[in-house]
Image (cartoon, coloured by chain):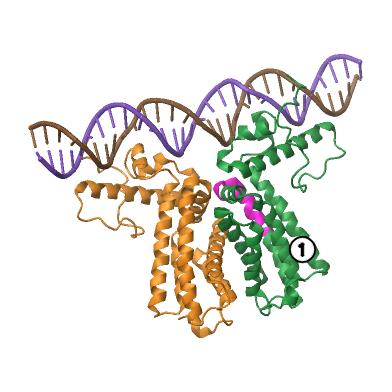
Chain colours: A green, B orange, C brown, D purple
DNA sequence: CTCATATACGACCAACAGCCATATTATCGG
DNA sequence: CCGATAATATGGCTGTTGGTCGTATATGAG
């Protein structure tokens, strides 16, 4: 019972987000296998959380789906909650992209922030259960909360940069403190995801869309023109 | 060992919110004792949640603090999470008061909503740990979520009423759908509590204050005059 | 005083997160 | 090509905890 590893639940390493563990080449088979295993665990975990809801998934379910032993899980993640904090890193990457985009100056700030919100909403929007798990676990575990808190801070700083650019270009009311605006965007985003996760009726994207319009209305330098809605 | 009930941890039935179990008179000593016990359990639970955080409090901790047997807890609450859903009812009461106030017409709608937000923020604002527990448990437990969902819906309807009044009186942009505005207020509120609970630096009231200003800026019929900030 | 019922109780159970000693690899020096 | 060594995998084990159940006790009516 050693190499007959190819049994049930293959859990293909192809589908899903691709922004994690990007460097897979040039480092012995051992590390590659390790990275592969970690990735498989991560994906299976998210999948199961999305399907059944976080509390209804045991570590053993995850390891079984990933076809590894139970103890292996704890070689890669400090705890069950820890899996979720990994996603925060992925989200942060999307914000980072937005900063680059904003500084490139080829799109309006409205467009950049708008698109960023929708992109960040993609993952939690996969299922209300997943969204709940994300938020709930962030708040529940002390260890995870530390990481999340950092990520939020960092994200906020980056958003503030974008806001500053928006103010410089006359899209956003310059009297507003950029840090505050950034915080409010995060608040609006999280609040929207939170409320959506209770019902999950239309897609999260729809909710985010409306929330963002509301948000923009409060910070735009003028009531908004049809022209600049699609920068 | 029957009447020597007065041992440790008295857990006075005086302190805390008074909006729960209001009818204590005219119904045998039995029911009074029961209501008393339930209230004591409720208060001790919240207190402990606020101090140590929800996941670090066991049911036994609660019953011990309330000086009752473990099983007694489940005579009054379906589950540990259920304790928290009781608070939702209390919060709903505050919204209800706001509706009355709005329809009385003695204050501006700005003032009514503003005050309402701050009042609802009082309880979760007692401690970041409590706020986290509230949100986290709402999302985690299926049974509780149902109740919470109802409460949010009901609250939203009531807020929409208030918004309608605000539109009629020319305080709020009449082009906005009142249900949407209500939803957005809830979203902003929850998002604010959520983010605050990660740091808890200044009082929650401060955060809510700023969020509300932002919210109002987006729905007010004009940028807001100093005069109507203190209706 | 006695009986019926509502409530209190804590021993008990099942489930699960996380640990650890052991087995199984991959890597590399000889 | 082989044996030593370190990295990784494994699953049995344990402590904790939410929740249940049958029994004991307090209450109030007759």
Query: At which x and y percent is residue B213?
Result: 55, 74
User: Can I make out residue B203 in this image?
Assistant: no
In this picture, is B190 found above or below C13? below
Q: Is residue A158 left or right of residue B217?
A: right
Residue at horizontal 47 percent and vertical 80 percent from the top: B230
Instruction: Give the overall secondary structure of the magenta segment.
Output: helix
User: Can I make out residue B104 in this image?
Assistant: yes
Residue at horizontal 63 percent and vertical 49 percent from the top: A127
Q: Is residue B169 left or right of residue C7?
A: right
Q: Say which chain tag 1 marks.
A: A
**Which region shows up in magenta?**
A139-154
Q: Secondary structure at mark 1?
A: helix
Query: At which x and y percent is residue A70?
Result: 64, 30
* Residue B84, magenta (yes or no): no
Query: At which x and y percent is residue A25?
Result: 86, 40
Residue at horizontal 40 percent and vertical 65 percent from the top: B94
Which of the 4 quarters of the picture holds residue A194?
bottom right
Query: At which x and y percent is residue B95?
Result: 43, 66
Which of the 4 quarters of the picture holds residue B181?
bottom right
Mark 1 lies on residue: A99
User: Circle 1: is it few (<14), some (14-19), or many (20+) Cα within 10 Å?
Assistant: many
Which of the image's four quarters has the C terminus of chain A? bottom right
Q: Is residue B159 left or right of residue A152?
A: left
* Residue B214 vs residue B108, the one in the foreground: B108
In this picture, is B131 found above or below A172? above
In this picture, is C24 found above or below B16? above
């Amino acid at each position: 019972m050693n190499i007959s590893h190819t049994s049930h639940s293959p859990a293909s390493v192809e589908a899903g987000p691709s922004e994690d563990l990007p460097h897979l080449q040039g480092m012995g088979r051992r590390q590659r296998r390790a990275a592969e295993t970690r990735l498989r665990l991560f994906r299976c975990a998210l999948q199961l959380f999305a399907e059944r809801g976080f509390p209804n998934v045991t570590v053993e379910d995850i390891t079984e789906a990933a076809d590894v032993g139970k103890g292996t899980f704890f070689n890669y993640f400090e705890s069950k909650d820890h899996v979720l904090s990994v996603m925060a890193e992925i989200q942060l990457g999307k914000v980072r992209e937005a900063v680059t985009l904003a500084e490139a100056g080829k799109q309006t700030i409205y467009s950049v922030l708008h698109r960023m919100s929708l992109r960040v909403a993609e993952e939690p929007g996969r299922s209300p259960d997943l969204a709940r798990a994300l938020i709930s676990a962030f708040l529940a575990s002390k260890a995870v909360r530390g990481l999340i808190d950092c990520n939020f801070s960092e994200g906020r700083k980056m958003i503030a940069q974008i806001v500053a650019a928006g103010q410089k270009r006359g899209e956003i009311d310059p009297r507003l403190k950029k840090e505050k605006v950034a915080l409010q965007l995060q608040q609006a985003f999280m609040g929207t995801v939170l409320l959506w996760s209770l019902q999950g009726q239309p897609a999260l994207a729809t909710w985010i869309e409306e929330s963002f319009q509301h948000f923009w209305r409060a910070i735009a330098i003028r009531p908004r023109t049809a022209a600049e809605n699609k920068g």
